[in-house]
Amino acid sequence: MSKRNWVRCLAAASIGVVLFGLVALAASHPGGAAVWGFFFDLVRWSFEPGAYQFDDDSRLLNGISGGLLIGWGSMMTWLSLGPIARGDGGARRAAWVAIGAWFLADSLGSILSDAPGNIVLNVGILLLFAIPLLALGRSARLARVAA
């Protein structure tokens, strides 16, 4: 696959994070709880359709989580389409640090909160970022060798 297509894959994964953040943000209002509640059913492997009613504190945390996801996804989109697309190794390393920190913290939180399904989801998301980043790193190394 071409470097351009790997950049597009990385940007698509980043935009997916933004969209997921919008779902979390929507759940800060009682009317937006259904989709976010379904996500909780998936990661806890227990399905109780329509059972989610978030209290005020949970809705606040939904909004904060949504904002963080939107911000992180926006930053990753910008890095993907800007510095990473131009071959900036520092930006690629920064993306690895951010993804690694997210994966470790989110997975630990999943273990502590008894949500094993979220770790499965995390591995999938990690791969959506890792595969293009690895390919772009390889492409950069090959370009240096050829020069």
Image (cartoon, grey):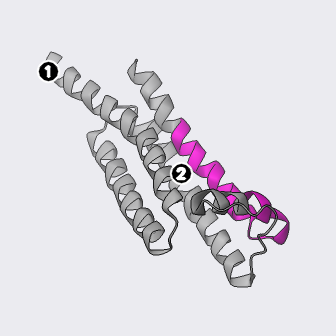
> What is the x, y in percent for residue 16?
59, 44
Q: Position of residue 37 (x, y in %)?
A: 72, 63
Residue at 55% from the left image edge and 36% from the top image edge: 12
Residue shown at the point (61%, 71%) measured from the top left: 64
For the N terminus, the image quarter is: top left
Q: Are marks 1 and 2 in contact (CB under 8 Å)?
A: no
Q: Nearer the viewer, residue 145 or 120?
A: 120
Residue 147, visible in the rendered structure:
no
10 Å neighbourhood of mark 2: few (<14), some, or many (≥20)? Answer: many
Q: Quadrant of the C terminus?
A: top left
Q: Please, which residue is most extreme toward the right here?
A: 31
Which residue corresponds to the image point at 39% horizontal and 23% vertical from the top-left?
Answer: 3
Disc 1 element: helix
Of helix, strand and loop, which mostly describes the magenta segment? helix
* Residue denoted by label 2: 73
Label 1 – label 2 distance at C-alpha: 32 Å
> Is residue 61 one of those drawn in magenta?
no
Q: Nearer the viewer, residue 92 or 103?
A: 103
- Residue at the image position 42 percent from the left and 47 percent from the top: 126
Label 1 or label 2, whichever comes before in sequence order: 2
Amino acid residing under circle 1: Val
Residue 30: give x, y in percent of width and height: 82, 71
134 is higher (above) or lower (below) than 100:
above
Could you say which quadrant of the image residue 138 lies in? top left
Q: Element under label 2?
A: helix
The range drawn in magenta is 12-35
Q: Amino acid at mark 2?
A: Gly
**147 in relation to 50, above or below:** above
Q: Which residue is mark 1?
A: 145
Q: Is residue 134 visible?
A: yes
